[in-house]
Image (cartoon, rainbow, N blue to C red):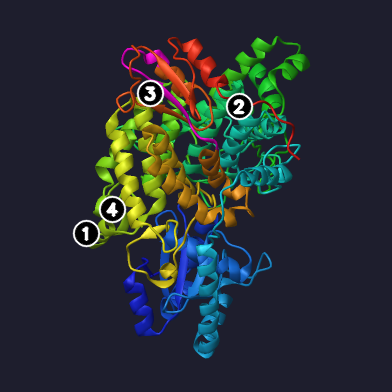
Amino acid sequence: MDWLPWGEEAFRRAREEDKPILLDVGAVWCHWCHVMDRESYENPELAATLNRRFVCVKVDRDERPDVDARYQGAVQALTGQGGWPLTAFLTPEGDVFFGGTYFPPDDRFGRESFGTILRRVDEVFRARREQVAASGGELKAHVARLLAGAAAGEPAPELLERGARQMDRLFDERHGGFGASPKFPHPAAIEFLLARWWDTGDARLREMVERTLTGMADGGVRDQLGGGFHRYATDERWIVPHFEKMSYDNAELLKAYVHAYAALRIPLWREAAEGIAAWCLEILADPGRGGFGASQDADVGLEDDGDYFTWTQAEARAALTGDEWEVARRRWDIGEAGEMRHDPARNVLWVARDAAAIAAELGLDPPRVEELLRGARAKLKAARDRRAPPAVDRAVYTGWNAMLAEAFLEAGAVLARPDLSAFALRTLERLWRDAPGSGGLLRHRADAPAVATGGAAAAAEDQAGPFFLDDQVQAASAALAASEHTGDARWLERSRDLMARTLERFAADGGGLVDAVAGAPRGLLDQPALPIQDAPTPAANAVAALVLLRHAAITEDPSWTERAGRLLQVFAGSAEQSGLFTATYLRAVDWLLNGACRIVVADATTSPTLRATALAAYRPRKVVVPSATSPVGGVAPPVALVCAGTACAAPVRDAAALLGTIQAFGRRPARVRIV
């Protein structure tokens, strides 16, 4: 296959040779992308047809989220579905006139073969030019409307109520989570509901948080041996996952679990958080330079489906003693018949029974069962480590690294793990050292751009863009967190400067922030996108608003609040209809309407226990103000001051008093269940 990268060369060739463009958007971690590569693109006959009749462009959706977002929208409008691999056929101008996802090499799954599709597309392109142009123009207009998707309004309290009610309607009463299968984690929704519960005392909100976090932690969607979470579950019970693991999913889930643990102290949630951190450090982390890779594949080869992560009875029994096997098979439901369709003997490990139930069944003491389970888990993990592991994408994406760094800072504080905080700071230092591009913005990748994009010319282009909004706002957010956790004013300055440049460079006509700037506007890239839905990472406009509001709380500068308010107004009308998928936006509205809790520790060097307490405690909309930025005037250290709204509590001088004040001061009375 003669693949070209996304760029002017591909469009020039398509125009000069009068050929349609085949756009293949995939990902390193995508199983069906690998399948289609092998079945079709590596097939000599199909490859010859493609090279002769088409200009073929391959795009990694992690490298170019801007390309993916626009062409996903076009293909979804055309076919009613999207995903990866994304297979789109474009005019030489870049407009879509046909597309789909996976196409098999022969007729199967109710789909025509890829060869048949190629012949038909070629015939239509050559014989029906006016129809092709009209179809492409209609789809382009649809994508423009879809991406612009901002309806102005007032970010009023009713938005929060409606968002919570919508999540309640979608809530799975039996298994937790939202909707049926396939079931994705929604960590931003968990964070929103947790804050609403804290504010209102509504037991229903707590129930949704508890059942969802516990269901995921007990399910096969969580790697019960190696830690971390797979991308989503194919069933409503959280048992059978799609086995790839993404850095951004685990970053947001780590924050959700540590915040919920800080609020409710459920040990399982601490265990889940510790597991995420352990997997990130073992599999994704660069121990020498700092930073994290992007993802881990689901599969080792094309013929398996999560075989690395799953077990037959024989495999598990061979790794364990007799007593360990008896508790392990009950704990993780390791039966003769497993859950995997491609090999019914293979089992996904999930928590089927707790230690007390196993102890009663076997006539053992619960501590003995726990001891046997620890031994069984360690031995199964060691046996799995001897298997050939799925590949890891080592690309160091700026936004996703910032998300993990901020999550590690939060986890370091809540779990009393200074090693996590230290690695987070090393990661952020690497971003500021290796990712700067033109105009003070951060590039999408902090590792070598020449290697990533193919040579010195491409590396030079990478310095100029495209730059992505997500990278800027996530890095600004993480730098702001670093300033809170360290008291180092340099991080506050870095966050402030980056946000100032972001607001200037990414400003959209009519308000809001566009997803990308610079780079040639080829194809559908001339259509501006204003991301407000969490799909799959937190919506960048909503993250920007949160960063602005946190700056306002730390600096007490109302201009930050004014900017955040204007940004949130741009989307208030459209957010009314999509509560679950605009959970990050709702969190920002919550900050705007309900205000921050400022915790000022007078001198972190003489009162490290007070600072640690402030950082580890749960309270919605909390900021821990670096003492150098806002000292407590006239009060001798060590002392801490908690302020909420327009009032401050009496200064406190010990950790227990500070924790009690954080939990109680300014808290509203409980309210009845939402309906």
Q: Which mark is residue 456?
A: 1
Q: Is residue 261 left or right of residue 285?
A: right
Residue identifier under label 4: 449
Quadrant hosting residue 480: top left
Q: Which residue lies at the image location 33% right of the left edge and 19% below the top edge?
A: 633
Q: Nearer the viewer, mark 2 or mark 4?
A: 4
Residue 145 in the image: x percent, y percent? 54, 68
Q: Is residue 363 left or right of residue 218?
A: right
Q: Is the Cβ of the residue at disc 2 closer than 8 Å to that at disc 3?
A: no
Question: Magenta segment, which residues?
Answer: 594-610
Residue identifier under label 3: 419
Q: Is residue 87 above or below residue 648?
A: below
Disc 4: CA contacts within 10 A as few (<14), some (14-19) or many (>=20): many
Q: Which mark is residue 573?
A: none
Q: Which numbered disc flags the more N-terminal residue, 1 or 4? A: 4
Q: Which numbered disc flags the more N-terminal residue, 2 or 1? A: 2
Q: Secondary structure at mark 3?
A: helix
For the residues labelled 3 and 1, the Cα–Cα distance comes to 37 Å
Nearer to me, 503 or 222: 503
At label 1, which amino acid type do we have? Ala
Nearer to me, 162 or 53: 162
For the residues labelled 2 and 3, the Cα–Cα distance comes to 35 Å
Q: Nearer the viewer, mark 3 or mark 1?
A: 3
Residue 488 in the image: x percent, y percent? 29, 28
Q: Is the Cβ of the residue at disc 3 closer than 8 Å to that at disc 4?
A: no
